[in-house]
């Protein structure tokens, strides 16, 4: 057992992600966390979801979700059956129903007299801003739908999206959903190679991109990566639509490339949405797994929309008439799908969208935005909160943050210190914090307090949401008693669950349903405290979490060994004060490269950037003479993690060569 897992359990093999080793003692303490923050009577009285919801959902889960589906969505054709689980693990929700995501996010609000409500306040990094009412956004999406159709995209076709955080991203996704095309967003921080492999895997017909965006006050290009990705023949892309965002020069491929303004801009604003089958694919989103190849996580329509909309309303206590909601996630990640593109618009909310970085042009930019739009619900990641802590409270203190009434956290465990700072400094000692656990695969939030019901506990995601059956089990799959740890599982199908891995049903079964046959295995370690509240302890597999972004150790290792200078590589996620984990690589160099250490290391970082993307570049690359391996040849990453985190490596007796760790230590001291 590694020294930073709680002592009362021997079942969680890996070190927690956000609660790093140096916080080990703090972590022990927090499992005895006694501070609780119950909702104020006023908040509880006005909350949209009350305590009774848990019992109602427990009594009949499918019936509970069927009720939510009918209340939150307008179905073109009502469904016959809430859940078909006759062929596990392949679930069907709201069988026989037909629903259009874009109609639900847009047209129906306009029909209901809400056309003048602002849907999106967009704030560009250079300071430009524009707002779209529901009526305006509906019109834009109808035009985009017509434009995409005129470029030959029809129902079931895949569209790759490589865009920055601008309204056109939301418009593109909703236009795809409207016509039944399946979007596959590739985060702008991924490289041309990564983009190409995702385009190929999904066989995308259309790519939607931009000339570029702004990053820390400077233009940052996107289109060249698309050109690069498509430079080798053999792909399926017929057209590329390019949003003009930062005005930088772009190469142009006549016949293939089309400016957004000239296609979408010129298209008709008349477009009738038709219902799609509840199980019609809505999107594919690639995420890192434990092997080198990213998985195309597939989500479908009715169940996904129901659970994202329900959780958005319940967990953030959404009052759409008065709230201003801001989720800071990029549309390239699942949070930007579920809680920027779909749920807030389905629920008729007003939201803020920001293009840039938190320190551009100054470190108070976020708080300036909160003040400007009177943001009342803020949803962000612990890594951002820890960064703001580092910058100091005098920065947010300069702004009027009194509009804030609910704070959300997502992506990794939030340490109690950051939780308390978030509540005190950003939440004025008053706003409830909802720590939301979920995954790309779960589609929507699964574990979170209800702000008007649950007495919040700093650092714990606490309780499964109504209608969600989460448990912590031991290696045999038995539920652990309170006070013990183990593996996080989901016992019953849920509406927003992934329907599979694109093109690979076997991998879907192997990855999630083979560890504990009848339960979904999330890949996270967790613990139940004495009250039965759930604490997330980080991944138990070879997946890292850097700033709330998922990266695979294997994928980065493959990228490293694909460089001619590298003989062998091992990658670990070392705990990091700000980013939760940081990528640290150990490499054995070949021949000459070994004499050119520093230069080679820089080249290797860039190589990983090219193969996967800048977000995957190792923070540290350590050149070593050997890697610690067991007698069967398996690299013992646990020992490397000890080194990367500055600890004395633990038990090394199972190594084929027990002196390796000393050799490594010596080589690093040089
Ligand atoms: C992994 C999923 C959920 C959208 C963003 C990340 C970790 C996520 C929490 C949380 C502790 C968390 C888990 C999970 N994670 N939220 N509130 N507390 N850990 O989505 O890229 O699919 O990553 O992020 O380890 O498995 P993702």
Image (cartoon, grey):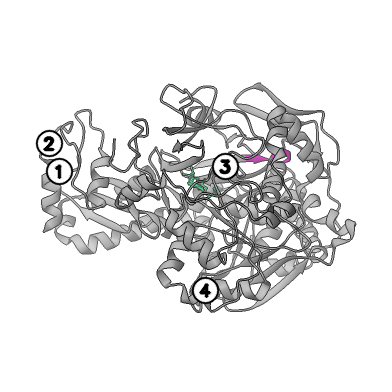
- At a point 62% along the width and 35% down the height, the residue shown is 468
Tag 2 and tag 3, C-beta contact below 8 Å:
no
Q: How far across and down, in percent of the image, does residue 227 sit?
A: 53, 61
Looking at the image, tell me whether mark 2 or mark 3 is earlier in sequence order: 3
Give the number of the mark in front: 4 or 2. Answer: 4
Residue 573 in sight from this viewpoint: no
Q: Nearer the viewer, residue 397 or 373?
A: 397
Give the number of the mark in front: 1 or 3. Answer: 3
The answer for how far apart the CA atoms under marks 4 and 1 are is 46 Å
The answer for how far apart the CA atoms under marks 4 and 3 are is 29 Å
Which residue position holds label 1? 661
Which residue position holds label 2? 658
| 222 displayed left or right of 120 | left
Tag 4 and tag 3, C-beta contact below 8 Å:
no
The answer for how far apart the CA atoms under marks 1 and 3 are is 40 Å
Q: Which of 125 and 403 is in front in this view?
A: 403
Give the number of the mark in front: 4 or 1. Answer: 4
Task: Please rate how many residues cluster around mark 1, counting C-alpha atoms within 10 Å: few if below 14, some from 14 to 19, many from 20.
Answer: many
Q: What element carries label 1?
A: helix
Q: Does the residue labelled 3 lie within 8 Å of ligand 1?
A: yes
Q: Residue 447 carries which label?
A: 3
Q: How far across and down, in percent of the image, does residue 350 sit?
A: 73, 63
Q: Nearer the viewer, residue 251 or 418?
A: 418
Which residues fall within the magenta stretch?
A: 299-303
44 part of magenta stretch: no
- At a point 40% along the width and 58% down the height, the residue shown is 579
Looking at the image, tell me whether mark 4 or mark 1 is earlier in sequence order: 4
Q: What element carries label 3?
A: loop
Which residue position holds label 4? 396
Looking at the image, tell me whether mark 1 or mark 3 is earlier in sequence order: 3
The answer for how far apart the CA atoms under marks 4 and 2 are is 51 Å
Q: What element carries label 4?
A: helix
């Amino acid at each position: 057992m590694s020294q930073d897992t709680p002592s009362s359990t021997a079942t969680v093999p890996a070190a927690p992600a956000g609660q790093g080793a140096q916080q080990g003692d703090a972590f022990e303490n927090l499992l005895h966390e006694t501070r609780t923050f119950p909702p104020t009577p006023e908040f509880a009285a006005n909350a949209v979801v009350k305590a009774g919801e848990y019992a109602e959902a427990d009594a009949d889960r499918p019936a509970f979700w069927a009720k939510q589906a009918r209340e939150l969505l307008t179905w073109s054709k009502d469904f016959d059956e809430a859940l078909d689980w006759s062929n596990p693990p392949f679930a069907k929700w709201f069988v026989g129903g037909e629903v259009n995501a874009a109609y639900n996010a847009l047209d129906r609000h306009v029909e209901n007299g809400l056309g003048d409500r602002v849907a999106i306040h967009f704030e560009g990094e250079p300071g430009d801003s524009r707002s779209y009412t529901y009526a305006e956004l509906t019109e834009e999406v109808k035009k985009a739908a017509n434009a995409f159709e005129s470029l030959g995209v029809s129902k079931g076709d895949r569209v790759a999206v490589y865009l920055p955080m601008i309204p056109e991203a939301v418009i593109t996704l909703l236009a795809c959903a409207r016509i039944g095309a399946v979007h596959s967003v590739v985060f702008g921080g991924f490289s041309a190679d990564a983009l190409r492999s995702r385009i190929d895997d999904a066989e995308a017909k259309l790519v939607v991109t931009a000339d570029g965006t702004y990053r820390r006050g400077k233009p940052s290009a996107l289109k060249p990566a698309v050109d690069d990705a498509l430079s080798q023949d053999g792909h399926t892309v017929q057209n590329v639509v390019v949003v003009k965002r930062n005005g930088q020069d772009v190469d142009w491929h006549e016949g293939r490339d089309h400016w957004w303004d000239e296609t979408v801009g010129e298209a008709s604003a008349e477009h009738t949405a038709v219902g799609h089958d509840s199980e019609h694919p809505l999107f594919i989103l690639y995420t890192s797994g434990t092997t080198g190849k990213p998985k195309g996580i597939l989500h479908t329509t009715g169940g996904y929309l129901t659970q994202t909309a329900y959780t958005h309303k319940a967990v953030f206590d959404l009052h759409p008439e008065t709230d201003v909601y801001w989720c800071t996630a990029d549309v390239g990640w699942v949070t930007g799908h579920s809680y920027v593109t779909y749920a807030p618009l389905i629920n008729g909310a007003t939201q803020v969208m920001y293009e840039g970085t938190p320190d551009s042009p100054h470190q108070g930019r976020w708080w300036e935005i909160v003040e400007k739009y009177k943001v009342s619900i803020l949803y962000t990641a612990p890594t951002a909160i820890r960064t703001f802590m580092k910058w100091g409270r005098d920065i947010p203190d300069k702004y009027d943050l009194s509009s804030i009434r609910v704070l959300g956290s997502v992506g990794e465990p939030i340490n109690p210190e950051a939780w308390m700072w978030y509540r005190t400094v950003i939440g004025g000692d008053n706003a409830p914090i909802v720590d939301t656990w979920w995954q790309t695969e779960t589609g929507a939030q699964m574990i979170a307090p209800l702000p008007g019901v649950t007495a919040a506990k700093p650092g714990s995601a606490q309780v499964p949401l109504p209608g969600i059956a989460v448990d912590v089990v031991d290696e045999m799959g038995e539920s652990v008693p309170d006070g013990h740890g183990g593996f996080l599982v989901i016992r019953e199908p849920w509406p927003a669950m992934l329907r599979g891995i694109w093109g690979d049903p076997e991998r879907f079964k192997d990855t999630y349903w083979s560890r504990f046959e009848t339960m979904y295995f999330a890949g996270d370690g967790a613990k139940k405290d004495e009250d039965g509240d759930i604490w997330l302890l980080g991944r138990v597999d070879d997946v890292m979490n850097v700033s709330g972004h998922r990266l695979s150790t294997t994928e980065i290792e493959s990228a490293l060994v694909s460089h001619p200078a590298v003989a062998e590589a091992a990658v670990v996620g070392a705990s990091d004060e700000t980013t939760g984990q940081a990528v640290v690589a150990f490499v054995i160099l070949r021949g000459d490269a070994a004499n050119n250490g520093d230069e080679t290391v820089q080249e290797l970082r860039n190589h990983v950037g090219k193969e996967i993307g800048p977000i995957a570049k190792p923070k540290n690359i350590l050149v070593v003479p050997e890697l610690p391996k067991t007698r069967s040849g398996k690299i013992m990453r646990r020992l490397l993690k000890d080194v990367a985190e500055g600890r004395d490596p633990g038990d090394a007796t199972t190594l084929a060569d027990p002196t390796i760790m000393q050799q490594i230590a010596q080589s690093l001291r040089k």
